Image: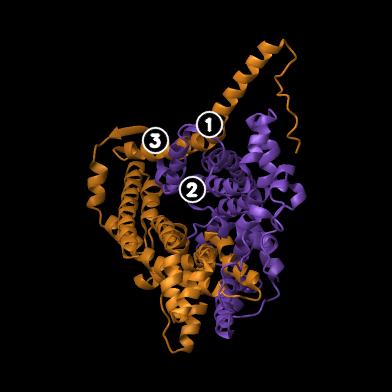
Amino acid sequence: MTTDSIPVQTADARPAVAKKARKGTPSGGRRRQLFRHPGAGRQHHAGPVAYILLGIAALFSLFPLYWTMVAASSDNTRVTQTPPPFLPGPHLLENLGKAWQDAALGKAMLNSLIVAGVIALSTVLFATLAGFAFAKLRFKGRNILLMLVIGTMMVPPQLGVVPLFMMMTELGWGQKLPAVIFPTLVSAVGVFFMRQYLSEALPDELVEAGRVDGAHSLRIFWSIVLPIARPPMAVLFMITFVHAWNDFFWPFIVLDMTNPTVPVALTQLSAGYVRDQSLIMAGALLGTLPLLALFIVFGRQIVGGIMQGAVKG
Amino acid sequence: MAISTSTPPDGAPGIGAERQRRRTLLHRLDVRGAPYAFVAPFFVVFAAFSFYPLIYTSWISLHRVELSTLNLMEWVAFDNYTALWDDDRFWNALFNTFTIGVLSTVPQLLMALGLAHLLNYRLRGSTFFRVAALTPYATSVGAAALVFTMLFERDFGMINWMLSLFGVDNIDWENNKWAAQTAISSIVIWRWTGYNALLYLAAMQAIPRDRYEAAAIDGASRWQQFLKVTVPGIRSTIVFTIVLSTIGATQLFGEPLIFGQGPNGITGGADNQYQTLGLLLYEEGWKNYQMGRAATVAWAMFLVLILVFVVQRIVKRVLARRA
């Protein structure tokens, strides 16, 4: 595996003005700098000790997931024996099938897919709109509003659950997906993330050029901002998707077992009096698989996105 | 990509001056108004589903409201607050939230710092190590808590088996207060260490290299460079992660709930030995059906958070003065 940076849009996707402006810079210009080469600040070559420690860290990270798979593929007697099994057993498909039925995971997955998909889409759209405004448009109260956005990051939504629950009941959304979707349609972190990106990656001249040509704001957003913002939008989408898929507190309160999301459905598995361990693990594995797949395919991008969103210095 | 579509959609052919005037007007309207339209969705949704409920919580906390009859609110003034103050479960939950918070946040951030330092070396396969470190972050609270509950099982759990190899007797992770809190903290640590490590790594890579060179010339060892260059260089990120983890810790809910396996989860164990404020809020509202009291707990959580921010600001100022 190489240590390349996030694959950003290549130059031809960039508007002509930007290309001209960055003629001197090799491969990528400002946008590439933002997704900086991972090794930019590194100091020393790693020695064997560093590799061993990193190996242990990787083992700690991955072992519980591996063991979920081991337990999910065993029967109960095998799971509960001492010493515990370390290799997968033969019952994987059987257990997965049983968990799928017992925890109504089919419905839960569809629900989670809808919830996470809608939330991620709307978060990305609204965050890009607002991020563009905060980064490149001048308007009264901009700084105060931006401070407000940052301030809202500090307010955990959990503090309003009681009235929120009452609101949802009144709206007739109790146990329904809109109750989960609406409160999380936007994200302050997302707005901030897109603002940071666009203030660096979108040259002022380009917006000005659009204005001179007579394009109105939405047109500028559509034709200039969106193409440039595609890479961070993809990252924000994935991060938001992961968060929304895993969200627990509010869905647990407002949904019930007849219409759960995956994390809510999983609690059902462990709540019974008879605890079928391999079944529980099969459920946990099923609930995690979609996101693991996402990580295997887009892991590097998600890592890059989180690092890019970090507060530096 | 065509920026050159210069005619606005409203630019119907008309008499020059009139058209020009309308155009400038529309243009000015667009320039003035569009920014607000662009940021509006965020603020509208936030106001409706976060800010308004947050304020309304305080109003509800002054009432007696039952889950079954949400529209009947009986004014009780500060009764809910005095009742909460006199309730042992509240102080217990507050204390548990604090201890589990410390048990999970401190090791988590220290380990993240070490991990970030290792990832900052010139590495082969660095992408693999980064993705591996972040994988637990993709695991839902539900799945993670289920797996760890099993690993911490008293009779056949893997942790007890490994400890038994070192001659340690079986630990009853669920019923022993400190053991349970340690186990719950380990779920949090597992899920979030890699995430924090990546935040640190990003900050570390922004430290100018010549600082290390200067330190090396001055004869600083690698450990000294780490303490004197790296850690001060990422101070604001450290503060940021402390704030984030603290907010996370005050809301701790899913981990203890699932660790308690069913009915015991809501009360945080048979003796409330690991009941957090989040669980208490849920118990008051959705198990005891007292929404007013639940709102009071929410306010208590809010006050705790404010207190944390004040302390954090003081710490930040002290740190800044030292530097």
Seen in the picture, residue B28 relative to A271 is either above or below; the reply is above
Q: Which chain can be seen in orange?
A: B
How many numbered tags mark residues here? 3
The reply to whether callout 3 and callout 2 are in contact (CB within 8 Å) is no
Residue assigned mark 1: B36
Task: Give left or right: position of A176 versus B270.
Answer: right
Q: Position of residue B102 (x, y in %)?
A: 36, 66
Q: Mark 3 points at which residue?
A: B69
Q: Are marks 1 and 3 on the same chain?
A: yes
Give chain A's shade: purple
Tell me the mark number nearer the camera, choosing from 2 and 1.
1
State the scheme by which the image is colored. Answer: by chain
Q: In this view, does B88 lie to the left or right of B253?
A: left
Q: In which quarter of the image is residue B70?
A: top left
- Badge nearest the viewer, 3 or 2: 2
- Label 2 belongs to which residue? A250
Q: Residue B115 carries which label?
A: none
Q: What residue type is labelled 3?
A: Thr
